[in-house]
Amino acid sequence: MKYISTRGQVQDIGFIDAVLMGLADDGGLLIPSHIPQVSEEQFQQWATLSYQELAYEIFSYYTNDEIPQDDLKALIAESYGTFRHPEVTPVRKVNDDMYVLELFHGPTFAFKDVALQFLGNLYSYISKKQDKIIHIIGATSGDTGASAIEGVRSKEGIRICILHPHQKVSKVQELQMTTVHDENVLNLSVEGTFDDCQRIIKELFADVDFKNQYHLRAINSINFARILAQTVYYFYAYFQVTKQTDAKLVNFSVPTGNFGDIFAGYLAKRMGLPVGKLIVATNENNILERFVKDGIYQPGQFHSTFSPSMDIQVASNFERYLYYLLNEDANQVAALMDQFKANGKIVIDEAKLRIVHDDFDAHGVMGEECLTMISKYYKEYDYLLDPHTACGVAAYEQVTDSNEVCVTLSTAHPAKFNESIERCNIEQTYPEQISQLFDKPQYQEIVKADNAEIARRLEQFFSK
């Protein structure tokens, strides 16, 4: 297995080099040179594995033995030993047709922990083995930042800077990031949107000289290791659900703003997982819904919503799917991304749109519909959804037929978004780890959404 860029100018690099490069040096995204196919025999064997054993099997397809077998198993054990549930990502049956995949049992109560506990430990492993300095920068709409910080805080040889949109994340998300007082952690609160934060990160990575001078590494889902780690729980959920039902195909409804989580499902499907529909669940910032339905990828007006982690207009992982949609034609991908940068719009033809419809369905959840789902499922099933999972459930209800089984990905614990839960007149009890945050001092710097200002601050931080 080698790694290549969606834009064609980076070819045949190894797994560890791909992890360290993050964003490809030509501005594209790194992907595997081919998608491995799981044999029927292997698939049947996987059905009985623990989460950690399954992760090892899937990772092994992609790591080229660059990480010795025992080291990889130890990394996996360390990463998922921090989770509060023995199954890591347990599946909860809500009704006969819908199951919830609970991805919030990690240290920061969000699905990002599944990938970032592993990636943080992997960066630490690489730093020690290669005696390399690793400086991580990332942008967050809320959950990535806390998970990334938790994954690398206090680790020798690593520093991390996280950008988040000022006052546009939930209070708990903000506290999880900014109450960490470690010398190797810097929080920058950016006066702008998440899209501003993400754009700045990608442009800093595109400056290859700056990237190399300061040893910059990516923690966002532009890093393929993030996608790889998330692919595991699609297989795991499928195996758990099919033990309880006669279904041969399983739908997945995925709350998504940056297209990373659902792209992991697409990768699992391409590997051979019997997935029916991959359902894109968005909120009012519904660029992905418009693309799936109409074939037009164009940012609209930004909206602050009840589900702030999906308040994203430009989905950084969309380019990975575009590569496969365009028959793995890197030149065409590069041309379309240049067009998007110039004109802010990509339009695909009817033939390509039919392929999209074979791969995905979509539903954008507007305002009160999200809160309605929270209230409904709390009342009818005694199950409390966070607002992002509520969008996933709403999408399941809209596009899943009565004879289909669907797994909705629950991306965060509801305690992280009490602002929305309170609007439903529901009183919840905070887990102790979250309630303690409110008594801690915060450490963050407020900055303008300006590349030069943020680059200067990074230079100061990484030069210490």
Image (cartoon, rainbow, N blue to C red):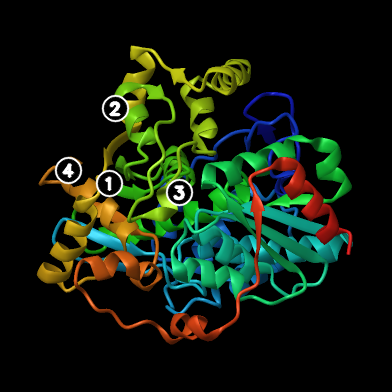
Whole-number angstrom distance, CA of label 4 to CA of label 3: 20 Å
Residue 298 placement, left or right of 306 = right
Q: Which residue is mark 3?
A: 261
Whole-number angstrom distance, CA of label 3 to CA of label 2: 19 Å
1 or 2: tag closer to the N-terminus? 1
Q: Which residue is mark 2?
A: 293
Q: Which residue is mark 1?
A: 251
**In front: label 3 or label 2:** 2
**In front: label 1 or label 4:** 4
Q: Is residue 453 above or below residue 333?
A: below
Instruction: Say which amino acid is labelled 3.
Output: Asp
Q: Name the image quarter holding residue 381.
A: bottom left
Specify few, some or many for label 3: CA neighbours under 10 Å numbering under 14, 14-19, or 20 or more: many
Q: Position of residue 462 (x, y in %)?
A: 83, 59
Whole-number angstrom distance, CA of label 1 to CA of label 2: 18 Å
Q: Which mark is residue 398?
A: 4
Q: Residue at point 26% right, 70% down?
A: 422
Q: Position of residue 330 (x, y in %)?
A: 62, 21
Instruction: Say which amino acid is labelled 1.
Output: Asn
Instruction: Say which amino acid is labelled 4.
Output: Gln
**Mark 1: secondary structure:** strand
Q: Position of residue 138 (x, y in %)?
A: 64, 53
